[in-house]
Image (tube, coloured by chain):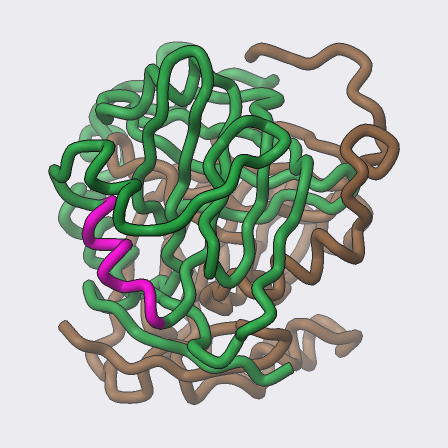
Chain colours: A green, B brown
Amino acid sequence: MNSVPNMPLSGEAMTGVSSKTYRDGMSRLGAAVNIVTTDGPAGRAGFAATAVCSVTDTPPTLLVCLNQSSSVFETVMANRALCVNVLAGNQEALSNLFGGKTPVEERFSAAKWIYGRSGAPVLEGALATFDCELSDHQDLGSHRVLYCSVLDVGLCEDTAPGGLLYYGRGYHRVGLTG
Amino acid sequence: MNSVPNMPLSGEAMTGVSSKTYRDGMSRLGAAVNIVTTDGPAGRAGFAATAVCSVTDTPPTLLVCLNQSSSVFETVMANRALCVNVLAGNQEALSNLFGGKTPVEERFSAAKWIYGRSGAPVLEGALATFDCELSDHQDLGSHRVLYCSVLDVGLCEDTAPGGLLYYGRGYHRVGLTG
């Protein structure tokens, strides 16, 4: 790691870009909607997330950016297991459920789950699922980037609903082309 | 950094997930298409990329995943400046140009550019632009994750073309809703 010593916490002081301007720009970067789940010694939890990105297929590794002040943060870090469930175009309601203040058990009772190798809940009907264990992380300001080794990949056979995307501060559906 | 000592380079040996299976799964994770540009002491370069993700707005920071064997890798690392240009729905041709084997000058001559604070080329007509300087990085297998401090954000006034997305191994356009 090439750390930057004494990185200031206020981006505006350093760069002149306000959080609002940055968010306005990021609202134009379309992204898939996922439900990230975890289970293990610290209990079950899940949250909706768009900040998921492939890192490399050698070895299969993805990343998830997580706010360190979020309610699920300690649970994920203690379990060191998570599943990225890529939502299909007809799963918008599930995204809202996992993005709000709904209690954990109510969230999970709205769908069917199986358990992956990591111990994390895997969503039935998701377009794709990536069952992972945490391999490393890096803190940047308010967030932690979680590097996740992929233990298993699941692919839903029914791709007709397409994918659920978030863009321009709203949901969109996008169809498969291949 | 909590490094994992002796992480094996073969994902398959460690996790049982082949590169092909992982890629099949990742083809279902829709993502915005961007042209990432750089300029500086090591010269000008640019490439199409979907592996771009917001990290935090405190301070405004994004990440770009880059293959360490790519032709632009040394140029970006030497310049330590880059601009993420989020493509509009009508800029598919530009994505193909920057994703192929076209010589650098030919790529850039296909569009209009201004120069950002970092020194990187900023694309006129992009849906949004994030002019950045490299602040940190982390290597994972074949790739390097570049953490980028955002110096400037540009927003195109004409949002009618929507955004350009890559999903299911093909391009899609997605409209603004807000």
Name the spot of residue A142 as percent of width and height, x first.
28, 25
Where A60 falls versus A67 (above or below)? below
Residue B14 visible in the shown view: yes
Q: Please give the name of the residue rendered at 43% of the width and 70% of the height, measured from the top-left corner.
A: A163
Q: Is residue B60 left or right of residue A112?
A: left
Of B111 and A31, the residue lying toward us = A31
Q: Please give the name of the residue rendered at 81% of the width and 48% of the height, measured from the top-left corner.
A: B18
Of A146 and B156, the residue lying toward us = A146
Where A33 falls versus A65 (above or below)? below
Name the spot of residue B50 as percent of width and height, x first.
55, 61
Where B145 falls versus B107 (above or below)? above
Q: Please give the name of the residue rendered at 36% of the width and 66% of the height, measured from the top-left corner.
A: A165
Q: Quadrant of the C terminus of chain A?
A: bottom right
Name the spot of residue A115 as percent of width and height, x first.
53, 35
Where A159 falls versus B146 (above or below)? below
For the record, the magenta segment spans A90-98
Question: In which quarter of the view is residue B60 placed?
Answer: top left
* Magenta highlight on residue A59: no
